[in-house]
C-alpha cells in the first residue's frame, strides 16, 4: 500500500504536476489563435446569445450551464485561490486570471464537439467526451477508458473530496459529528439523483444562482468598503506577477485554483476546462447550434474563474500582510480569517454554509455525470441503481475519509482525464474551427 502511494505521489508531483499546466497553456493558446480570437472580437454576438430568450422545449442552455457550473463553482474557488496565493504570492492572481482566458477555448471546443456528436435517446440527448471520442475520433476503446475514469472521478473528487471539505468545515465551526452529517447528506443526495436529469438540473438552476449571488455580494461589500486599498493591491499583483515565485505559484495556481489540489482537498480543477466532464451537461441543451452552446461554456469559465476566484483573491489580499506573511496560514483557515477580519465571527458560519451548498450542488452534478457514463457503458437501468447506491456510500465514507491514497488517486484520475481529452480536442481542432467559421459566416455580424 505504501509503495502504491509512493508511485501515485511520483506521477502527480513529477509528471502530471509540471506537464498538465504546460499542456493546458500550450493547447489553449494554440486554439485561441486557431479560432481567430473570436472570444475578444465577437463579444457582442456572444453576449446577445447568452441574453436571448429561449422558448424551445427541453432543457434550456441556462439550465445546462447551471448544471455544469454546479460541478465547478464552490470549494475550489474558495480554498484553491487561498492556496495559490499562499504558495505563489499576490502575483499568482495575475497568472490565475490569464490562465482562465487560455482555458476558455478549451471549454468552448469540448462543448462544440459534445453538441455535434450527441445522440438522441428517447426524449433526451446524451453526449460528452466519450461520444466524440467514439464517433469523431473513431476510438471506441479510448471512449470506454474515459467513461471509466469519469465514473471514478465522480466517486472520488466529485464526491469524497467534496464531502470531506464540508464535514471538516462544519466540525471546525459547529462541532458537528462528521459521520452523522455524512449520513444525512447521503440520504438527501440519494433522493436528488434518483429522480433523473430533470430533477438535478432543477435543483442546480435554483441553487447555484442563489449561492453565487450571496457570495458575490458579501465579497463585493468587503472590497468596496476597502476601496482605498485596491490600488495598492493591484500594484502588488502586477509587481509580483513577473518573478519566478509568482509564475510558479500562479501557473501552478491555475491548476490549484481550478481545484482543491492542496488545502481542504487536492485534485480537481475548478472550471474543469479540458477535463471532459461538463460537456456531458451541455449536451442536454435544447439549442441546435453547437457554437452557441459553446458560448455558454465560455461563460462558465468566466463566471467560475474570472469572477468568483478573483473576488475571493481580493478579499484575501486585503489581509495579505497580516495573514499570508504574518501568520502563514492557508486553505480554509486563510479564507475564514480574511472574511472574519471584515464581517466578524459570522464569516465562519457563512463560509461553512456556502461550502455545504456548493458541495451539495457539485456532488449531485457529479452523480449525474457518473450515471451518464454508466449508461454509456451498459445501457441498463439496474446498473444505474447500483451506481447510485455506491455513490451514496461514498458520501458517507467521504465524511470520515483521511487517506492520502484517496487524494493521490483523485489527482491522478483527473489529470489523466484532462490530458486525454485535451489532446483529443487538439487533434480535431480543425473540425471545431470549421464549425465555428461556418456559424459566423451564416450569422454575419461585424466584430464587437
Image (tube, rainbow, N blue to C red):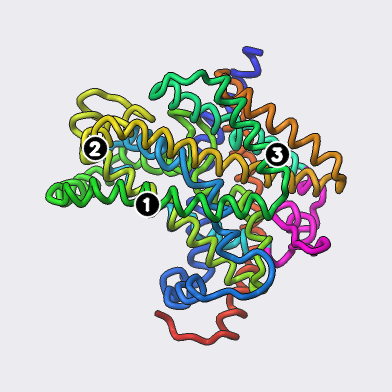
Region in magenta: 115-144
Q: Quadrant of residue 106?
A: bottom right
Q: Quadrant of residue 426?
A: bottom right
How many neighbours does mark 2 have within 10 angstroms: few (below 14), some (14-19), or many (20 or more)?
A: few
Residue at x 60%, y 79% (from the top left corner): 439
Residue 413's x, y, as percent?
Answer: 63, 35
In contact (CB < 8 Å): disc 1 and disc 3: no
Instruction: From this view, report whether residue 175 is shown above or below residue 394.
Output: above
Residue 238's x, y, as percent?
Answer: 23, 49
N-terminal of the two: label 3 or label 2?
A: 3
Residue bearing mark 2: 343
Confirm whether the magenta stretch covers residue 56: no
How many neighbours does mark 1 have within 10 angstroms: few (below 14), some (14-19), or many (20 or more)?
A: many
Instruction: From this view, report whether residue 112 is shown above or below residue 303.
Output: below
Which circle, 3 or 2, is nearer the viewer? 2
Q: Is residue 23 visible?
A: no
Residue at x 62%, y 54% (from the top left corner): 201
| Left or right of 372 in this view: 96 | left
Residue found at the very far left of the displayed protein: 228
In contact (CB < 8 Å): disc 2 and disc 1: no
Residue bearing mark 3: 149
Instruction: From this view, report whether residue 135 is shown above or below residue 145.
Output: below
Give the Cα distance between marks 1 and 3: 28 Å
The tag on residue 97 is: 1
Q: Is residue 350 visible?
A: yes
Amino acid at each position: 500500500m505504501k509503495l502504491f502511494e509512493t508511485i501515485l505521489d511520483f506521477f502527480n508531483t513529477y509528471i502530471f504536476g509540471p506537464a498538465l499546466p504546460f499542456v493546458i497553456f500550450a493547447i489553449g493558446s494554440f486554439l485561441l489563435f486557431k479560432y481567430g480570437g473570436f472570444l475578444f472580437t465577437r463579444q457582442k454576438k456572444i453576449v446577445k446569445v447568452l441574453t436571448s430568450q429561449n422558448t424551445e422545449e427541453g432543457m434550456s442552455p441556462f439550465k445546462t450551464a447551471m448544471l455544469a457550473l454546479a460541478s465547478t463553482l464552490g470549494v475550489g474557488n474558495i480554498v484553491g485561490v487561498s492556496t495559490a496565493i499562499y504558495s505563489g504570492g499576490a502575483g499568482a492572481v495575475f497568472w490565475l486570471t490569464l490562465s482562465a482566458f487560455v482555458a476558455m477555448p478549451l471549454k468552448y471546443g469540448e462543448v462544440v464537439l459534445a453538441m455535434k456528436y450527441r445522440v438522441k435517446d428517447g426524449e433526451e440527448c446524451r453526449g460528452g467526451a466519450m461520444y466524440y471520442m467514439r464517433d469523431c475520433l473513431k476510438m471506441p476503446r479510448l471512449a470506454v477508458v474515459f467513461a471509466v475514469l469519469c465514473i471514478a472521478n465522480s466517486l472520488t473528487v466529485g464526491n469524497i473530496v467534496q464531502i470531506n471539505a464540508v464535514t471538516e468545515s462544519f466540525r471546525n465551526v459547529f462541532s458537528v459529528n462528521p459521520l452523522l452529517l455524512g449520513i444525512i447528506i447521503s440520504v438527501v443526495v440519494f433522493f436528488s439523483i434518483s429522480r433523473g436529469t430533470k430533477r438535478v438540473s432543477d435543483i442546480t438552476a435554483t441553487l447555484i444562482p442563489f449561492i453565487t449571488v450571496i457570495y458575490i455580494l458579501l465579497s463585493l461589500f468587503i472590497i468596496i468598503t476597502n476601496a482605498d486599498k485596491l490600488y495598492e493591491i493591484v500594484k502588488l499583483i502586477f509587481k509580483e506577477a513577473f518573478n519566478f515565485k509568482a509564475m510558479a505559484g500562479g501557473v501552478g495556481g491555475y491548476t490549484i485554483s481550478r481545484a482543491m489540489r492542496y488545502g481542504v482537498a487536492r485534485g480537481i480543477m475548478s472550471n474543469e476546462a479540458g477535463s471532459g466532464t461538463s460537456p456531458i451537461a451541455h449536451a442536454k441543451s435544447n439549442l441546435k447550434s453547437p457554437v452557441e452552446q459553446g458560448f455558454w461554456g465560455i461563460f462558465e469559465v468566466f463566471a467560475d474563474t474570472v469572477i468568483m476566484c478573483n473576488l475571493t483573491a481580493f478579499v484575501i489580499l486585503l489581509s495579505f500582510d497580516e495573514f499570508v506573511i504574518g501568520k502563514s496560514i492557508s486553505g480554509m483557515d486563510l479564507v475564514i480569517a480574511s472574511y472574519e477580519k471584515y464581517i466578524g465571527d459570522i464569516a465562519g458560519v457563512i463560509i461553512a454554509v456556502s461550502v455545504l451548498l456548493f458541495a451539495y450542488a457539485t456532488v449531485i452534478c457529479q452523480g449525474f455525470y457518473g450515471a451518464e457514463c454508466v449508461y454509456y457503458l451498459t445501457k441498463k437501468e439496474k446498473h444505474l441503481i447500483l451506481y447510485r447506491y455506491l455513490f451514496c456510500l461514498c458520501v458517507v465514507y467521504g465524511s470520515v475519509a483521511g487517506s492520502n491514497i484517496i487524494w493521490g488517486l483523485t489527482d491522478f484520475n483527473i489529470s489523466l482525464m484532462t490530458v486525454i481529452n485535451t489532446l483529443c480536442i487538439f487533434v480535431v481542432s480543425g473540425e471545431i474551427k470549421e464549425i465555428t467559421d461556418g456559424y459566423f459566416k451564416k450569422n454575419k455580424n461585424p466584430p464587437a
